[in-house]
Image (spheres, rainbow, N blue to C red):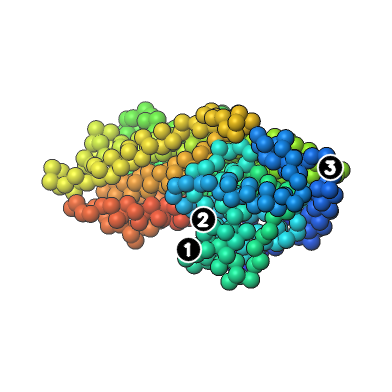
Amino acid sequence: MSLEHAATLVTVGAAPLRPADVVAVARHGARVDVAPEALTRVAAARALVEGLADDPEPHYGISTGFGALATTFIAPQRRMQLQASLIRSHAAGTGPEVEREVVRALMLLRLQTLATGHTGVREYAVATYAAMLNAGITPIVREYGSLGCSGDLAPLSHVALAAMGEGRVRDADGVELDAADALAAASIVPLVLREKEGLALINGTDGMLGMLLLALHDLSMLLDTADVAAAMSVESQLGTDAVFAADLQALRPQVGQAVSASNLRTALAGSPIVASHRDPAVCTRVQDAYSLRCSPQVHGAARDTADHALLIASRELAAAVDNPVITDDGRVESNGNFHGAPVAYVLDFLAIAVADVASISERRTDRALDPARSHGLPPFLADEVGVDSGFMIAQYAAAGIVSELKRLAVPASVDSIPSSGMQEDHVSMGWAAARKLRRAIDGLSRVLAIEVLTAARALDLRAPLQPAAATGAVRDLVRTVAGGPGPDRFLSPEMEAVTVLVASGAVAAAAGISRDSEPLT
């Protein structure tokens, strides 16, 4: 975990968290505190729960079992065991460990819901989650176990189990140890759960929402990078920038398309290469191929999709997802707000957009390597054609990733499967949608890196003509980690190094079109 932003403080419970707050805590180790007014709400709701606990009438989650066992009344002397048993039994994840940033996002978002005063937990439960985040204690959560309904039950249960001093965690240095030892080292007293608390700690869509917010943060930068990559390809393949003119884009008033076209104009401004073939007497082509000419339309559609997903995520950040909930007028009511459909749908929608942006990028890369379409570049950008293969297999890698992204674009949210004795007979599969989107984002980074690496070599091969200032700056950045044209060499390390530049935002920044480092507000 990076602690570069550890001095940053995020306050929970005063207002809904911003997406950038979630990224700061999850990815950069920002500290959290809980607003005093939130603790007042928490105390008031807890008093109500404790009053209902003494009521001979059953109240779901307070004096009954859970799920299909909701009609089973639990005697007062067994309720602490009930809550602990719920967590132990539901901490049933399996598979690889989930990334630390995802677990921290999940913890923060559950903390935010606890701080609303709608869950009925004690103040100590709230303080425990905040203390664990600040100590860098990250419960080990397994990849499989959530169906995205009744909350991300298994992932959240692994977190709650650690708060109880059970299970395994990683400390701030990433060392695995027993939760009890980690809590003791941080002077955190393990939670002993009381009525309603076990259910409140696990009945939320926090995992899938956290992954959505992290993906949106990364995708915002990657779409800027896609525009830069497209500009480099247009330029190096002797395409025209005329189609990106503002008045042409305005004829189809799509917001994202206008942004991407503007980025392309900025990146290509003043390009000697583009200027070299503006004269119709020099260039007789009427129009470029779709993968060049329609880049703003495809990238822009992805931008608009991301904006819609951000709207849904922002609404979720203002939500209090639990069942049952404590209402403002003191009622305890069952509800269905834990269903992950709103988040699951946009996660799937984004996976489609990511796959298509990667697909058009790979097509631009392929054009650069084909002498029948690249307008004067050598086959595969090879140094000695026939002896050298150039970037032939780099394109294979991009094609393989794009094929994988198409499979990842198949929606998870339509694949409901019944559980809990048919009580939970329709689920969102939002956690699965989020997991595949994370993989898709990584794939897009790699495909764009291959395009940037390819286009940088193609620009060099246009010498003595020079690229635009923006695209030239990116080419120069690439040259800090990857060599220029020449005989074949071990290419994989250069591809990995450029992928790091892409994923870090350095490519977009070098072109001067990236937004601030925390683009989500």
**Residue 512 visible in image:** no
Q: Residue drawn at (30%, 55%), measured in percent from left and top?
A: 494
> Which residue type carries mark 1?
Glu
Q: Between 101 and 400, which is closer to the camera in this rendering? A: 101
Is residue 308 left or right of 443 when viewed as pictured?
right
| Tag count | 3
Q: Where, by quadrant of the figure, is residue 6 drawn?
A: bottom right
Q: Which residue is mark 1?
A: 176
Tag of residue 140? 2
Q: Amino acid at mark 2?
A: Ile
Q: Residues within 10 Å of mark 3 (few under 14, many from 20)?
A: few
Q: Earlier in the sequence, mark 3 or mark 2?
A: 3
In the image, 493 versus 516, the foreground residue is: 493
- Which residue is at 79% across, 61% downward? 36
Of callouts 1 and 3, which one flags the residue occurring earlier in the amino acid sequence?
3
Residue 152 in view of the camera: yes
Q: Amino acid at mark 3?
A: Pro
Which tag is nearer the camera, tag 3 or tag 2? 3
